[in-house]
Image (tube, grey):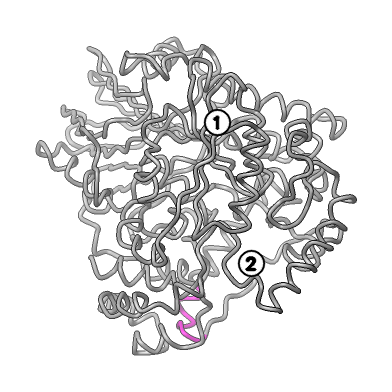
């Protein structure tokens, strides 16, 4: 995808472009286009998606960020030769007044429209803010952007750090919506239309309209109806995206979500399946079997031992501060696999979040006794008071107030499932979403579980329909049949309902634990990096020595006056230590 920066105050040529290019350590965008007028200045990088380059007419500048699938027309422009064909179709519908942002575009997008004659700007965000948008307002100047650090640099806010947000990130893995790592920069609202007008150098917000909320409003009489629409919606998204394609790539793992996508992809396509691993392990062997069963070409790619440390500076700058860098799994490997040569690379992300109630309160807890059926627990515990010996009470109290305010906002439209949607709405609250931020800046990624049907159905149906994979299984069982005897990475047989595959999972899991106890299966058997290996490496210590001066900017938040004690002590969990190291890097660059 591309990124944009907008300023209502006109800037010098090249200034905004420089901040966009700085997002990348390597291979910056081929071009960054700039536009200037009495309405202000815009810089937007060249889109990776065919047909979505910016469009300028006598009256408007029209920009589409991301690669949404269009539902009101065909999508053959995705392999066509006209650079702005998709942008033009959205623009024409926008001008006609017929556009419906809830129904016409599916997947991630942010749209920027400038009416040059009226010096007016509109900014539209997608349903869940898959494409994040940030805003800065001060003394009649409005600035917007899709990358928080680029916006901070352009607005002169790079050193104006919000210490509470930084501590929030260290402890909770995200910055609570709508805050950011900067005091004067806020996240925009998802599913919103913002309108601004500039007059005599003074820019004012004229309208902020929310066009959709994920309300608890179930239109289905039963789970079978919802499953039918879910299956049809996902298949429609994939078919629309690939209608003019002959060769695509997709990520494949030992899990069930990626094999559903493999089953959904038209068999007429040549399909290349990629998996990222430390070495060929259980995950890789299972993924190979799935690829063979579904007749996809299989390509494993291997990381260096220190990959997740080596990418820390580059990944942090790519995904933006306040977002966990370690989910940038494809960074560097995308070059090995040449993922940018495909018109589409398909993933299976967010199925657990949207369709399996992964973040709902339930018994048993997520990873304890996984063979037992899940039961929904009403209420919430997201507003529990924070306690942490490393950080001062006044900082923790600020974070508590922010988290409570976010929860109370969600409770206004999700009374029964606020606990679950606390970490889903907007999607910037999902700690692993930087996986997508990385991918969409590097190649043409399509995530079918981001489509409008999945989002709408997930929001509307009751939580207990999603527990025990009931909705997911009923919708997608046909696509699991080809690999029905190939186990999931966790030992289940996903083709079968939970009451069949849970005992199977328990038996296989018990056997694996016995192997581990005898020393026969000690290597990392999963797809992600081994956190213990990272923390025990020499590079871990060297990186702390290189960036520990960043602690000076948040020293007054801590009860300890020494970064080394914080870093090497036992008060932070392993994931929090990784967050802390990322924060040290980020702050050392300010």
Residue at image coords 42%, 88% = 559
Q: Are marks 2 and 1 in contact (CB under 8 Å)?
A: no
Residue identifier under label 1: 211
The quadrant of the rendering that contains the N terminus is: top left
Where on the picture, by quarter, is residue 106?
top right
Q: Tell me the residue at 36%/37% (across/down).
A: 205
Q: Position of residue 500 (x, y in %)?
A: 89, 50
Say which residue appears at 82% left-offset and 63% top-offset: 363
Dot 2 or dot 1: first in sequence order is 1
Between 395 and 50, the residue placed more toward the observer is 50
Point out residue 172 in the picture as x, y percentages from the top left corner.
53, 67
Crowd class of label 1 (few under 14; some 14 to 19; many from 20; radius 10 Å): some
Residue 209 appears at what percent x and percent y? 49, 33
Numbered mark located on residue 568 in the image: none
State whether residue 79 is above or below residue 134. Answer: above
Q: SS class of the residue under badge 1?
A: loop
Query: Is 396 one of the magenta-colored residues?
Result: yes
Q: Is residue 355 above or below residue 102?
A: below
In screen coordinates, is 80 left or right of 410?
left
Q: Residue furthest left?
A: 12
In this rendering, would 420 be left or right of 66?
right
Residue at 74 percent of width and 36 percent of height: 480
Q: Which residues are magenta?
A: 389-397
Residue 252 vertical placement versus 404 (above, below): above
User: Is residue 365 toward the left or the right of residue 251 in the image?
Assistant: right
Is 482 inside the magenta-drawn segment? Answer: no
Mark 2: give few (<14), some (14-19) or many (20+) Cα within 10 Å. Answer: some
Q: Say if 358 sits above or below 206 in the image.
A: below
Determine which residue is flagged by label 2: 383
Q: Nearer the viewer, residue 126 or 83?
A: 83
Real-space Cα separation, disc 2 to disc 1, in angstroms: 28 Å
Foreground residue among 47 and 103: 47
């Amino acid at each position: 995808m591309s990124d944009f920066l907008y300023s209502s105050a006109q800037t010098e040529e090249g200034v905004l472009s420089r901040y966009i290019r700085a997002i990348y350590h390597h291979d910056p965008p081929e071009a960054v286009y700039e536009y200037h007028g009495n309405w202000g200045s815009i810089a937007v990088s060249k889109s990776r998606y065919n047909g979505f380059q910016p469009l300028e007419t006598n009256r408007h500048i029209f920009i589409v960020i991301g690669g949404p699938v269009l539902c009101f027309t065909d999508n053959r422009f995705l392999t066509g030769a006209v650079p702005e064909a998709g942008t033009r179709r959205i623009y024409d519908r926008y001008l006609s007044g017929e556009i419906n942002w809830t129904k016409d575009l599916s997947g991630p997008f942010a749209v920027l429209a400038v009416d040059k004659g009226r010096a007016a700007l509109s900014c539209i965000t997608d349903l869940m803010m898959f494409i994040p948008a940030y805003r800065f307002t001060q003394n009649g100047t409005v600035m917007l952007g899709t990358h928080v650090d680029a916006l901070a640099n352009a607005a002169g806010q790079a050193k104006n750090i919000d210490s509470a947000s930084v501590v929030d990130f260290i402890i909770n893995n995200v910055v609570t919506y709508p805050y950011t790592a900067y005091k004067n920069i806020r996240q925009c609202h998802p599913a919103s239309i913002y309108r601004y007008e500039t007059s005599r150098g003074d820019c004012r917000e004229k309208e902020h309209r929310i066009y959709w909320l994920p309300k608890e409003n179930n239109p289905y009489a039963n789970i079978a109806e919802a499953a039918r629409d879910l299956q049809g919606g996902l298949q429609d998204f994939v078919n629309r995206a690939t209608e003019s394609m002959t060769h695509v790539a997709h990520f494949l793992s030992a899990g069930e979500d990626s094999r559903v996508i493999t089953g959904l992809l038209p068999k007429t396509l040549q399909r290349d399946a990629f998996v990222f691993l430390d070495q060929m392990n259980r995950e890789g062997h299972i993924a190979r079997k799935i690829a063979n069963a579904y007749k996809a070409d299989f390509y494993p790619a291997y990381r260096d031992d220190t990959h997740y440390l080596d990418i820390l500076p580059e990944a942090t700058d790519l995904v933006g501060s306040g977002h966990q860098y370690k989910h940038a799994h494809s960074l560097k490997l995308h070059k090995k696999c040449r993922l940018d040569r495909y018109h589409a690379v398909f993933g299976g992300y967010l199925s657990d979040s949207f369709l399996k109630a992964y973040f709902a309160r339930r018994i048993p807890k997520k990873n304890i006794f996984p063979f037992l059926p899940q039961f929904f627990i009403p209420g919430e515990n997201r507003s529990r008071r924070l306690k942490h010996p490393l950080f001062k009470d006044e900082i923790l109290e600020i974070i508590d107030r922010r988290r409570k305010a976010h929860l109370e906002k969600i409770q206004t439209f999700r009374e029964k499932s606020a606990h679950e949607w606390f970490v889903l709405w907007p999607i910037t609250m999902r700690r692993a979403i930087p996986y997508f931020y990385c991918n969409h800046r590097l190649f043409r990624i399509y995530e079918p579980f981001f489509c409008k049907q999945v989002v709408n159905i997930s929001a509307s149906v009751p939580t207990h329909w999603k527990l025990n994979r009931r909705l997911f299984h009923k919708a997608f069982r046909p696509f699991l049949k080809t690999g029905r005897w190939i186990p999931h990475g966790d030992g289940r047989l996903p083709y079968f309902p939970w009451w069949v595959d849970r005992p199977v999972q328990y038996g296989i899991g018990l056997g694996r634990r016995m192997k581990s106890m005898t020393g026969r299966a000690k290597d990392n058997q999963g797809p992600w990096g081994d956190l213990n290996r990272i923390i025990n490496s020499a590079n871990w210590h060297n990186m702390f020595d290189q960036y520990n001066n960043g602690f000076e900017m948040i020293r007054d938040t801590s009860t300890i006056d020494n970064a080394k004690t914080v870093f090497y002590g036992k008060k932070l969990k392993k994931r929090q230590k990784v967050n802390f190291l990322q924060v040290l890097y980020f702050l050392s660059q300010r």
